[in-house]
Amino acid sequence: MGWLAAGGTYEVALVEGQVVARSASGASSPAGQVTTLPAEIRDRPEVHELQRFAEWLERHAAECTAQVSHWMVSSLPVPTALLAQVWPDEAWQAALRDIVVVGDGPGEAGFLRDVDGSGGLRVVDLDGETVRLACRTVTMPHPVLLPDLEELRSFAAELGVVQGVDQIHRATWRKPGDLRAGAVSVKEFAGAEYRSWFHLSSRVTSLGYKVSGASAVDRIRDAGRIVTASVDMGNPFTEEKAWTGSLSWSDQDGRRVLPLTDVGPVAWSEGMRMAAALHAGRTVTADGAE
């Protein structure tokens, strides 16, 4: 983006998301750039327009990241034609680049590096080869569904991969194979103490989850089925402090609690991830005691 005249003395531009100014007389010299906006041009329309544009770009980038994260957590098939349409946008590229995609065939997987106009995807596979995937749709699997996850993590470290959407380094939990028949809840992360119920609810929303009634909830798509993971938060009107309770899973409407044996791998991992994050935010005293 070029520089815009802001009165007769300064020019302004958007640089790395910030509105900066420079002297119009020294426009060709980087030394003329200033880090803060001079008071005399802060209210000029050119400055306000750039600030609004910067805010829009920030929201747009967040929306792109959220959409790609949704595709990944849900392991939804994404048309390659759609990826071709959005790829020229830098915000979409930042969210999509180096995410692991899987095509139609068993060996069609790798880190996404480029998308051409016809929907062809160039990926780096686990052999370090750049290959082209030509398929109608791809998935961006939840990491718990990736059979070569540890190998992908090691290879990503060698390549210096930094994903815009946390996929291969996302915390995962695998469902134990020895669950008790009839069990409907997990208490591994229960009992985390917070200063108040409202402190706990603030932690829930800051992590991107929702508060429904007296529970922290996360709705998860797992193998085409919507499952609601819930962590009990207690009653905000009965206690001065608050504690997290057990974790359970229910159907889409939250009316029927699912036996743990019926919880799918993605729903299990994401539910445990929520419970662990709430436990990690518990109140800790100055001496380190909980």
Image (cartoon, rainbow, N blue to C red):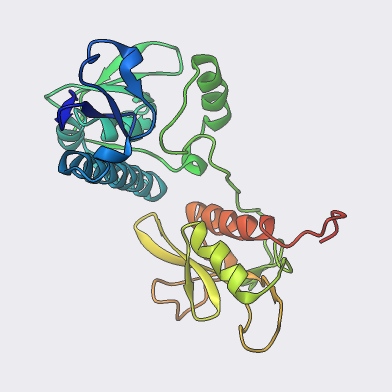
Instruction: Name which residue lies at 49% across and 40% down.
Output: 143
**Quarter residue 188 falls in:** bottom right
Asked whether, in this view, residue 108 is left or right of residue 173, the answer is left
Q: Position of residue 10 (x, y in %)?
A: 22, 27
How many discs appear?
A: 0
Write down the quadrant of residue 203 in the picture: bottom right
Residue 88 visible to the viewer: yes
Q: Is residue 152 placed above or below 61 in the rendered structure? A: above
Question: Could you tell me residue 84's position as x and y percent?
Answer: 17, 30
Residue at image location 55% in from the left, 27% down from the top: 153
Q: Is residue 274 left or right of residue 222?
A: right
Q: Quadrant of the N terminus?
A: top left
Image position of 214 with respect to 152: above or below:
below
Q: Residue furthest left?
A: 118
The C terminus sits in image quarter:
bottom right
Q: Residue at x 22, y 40 (%)?
A: 47
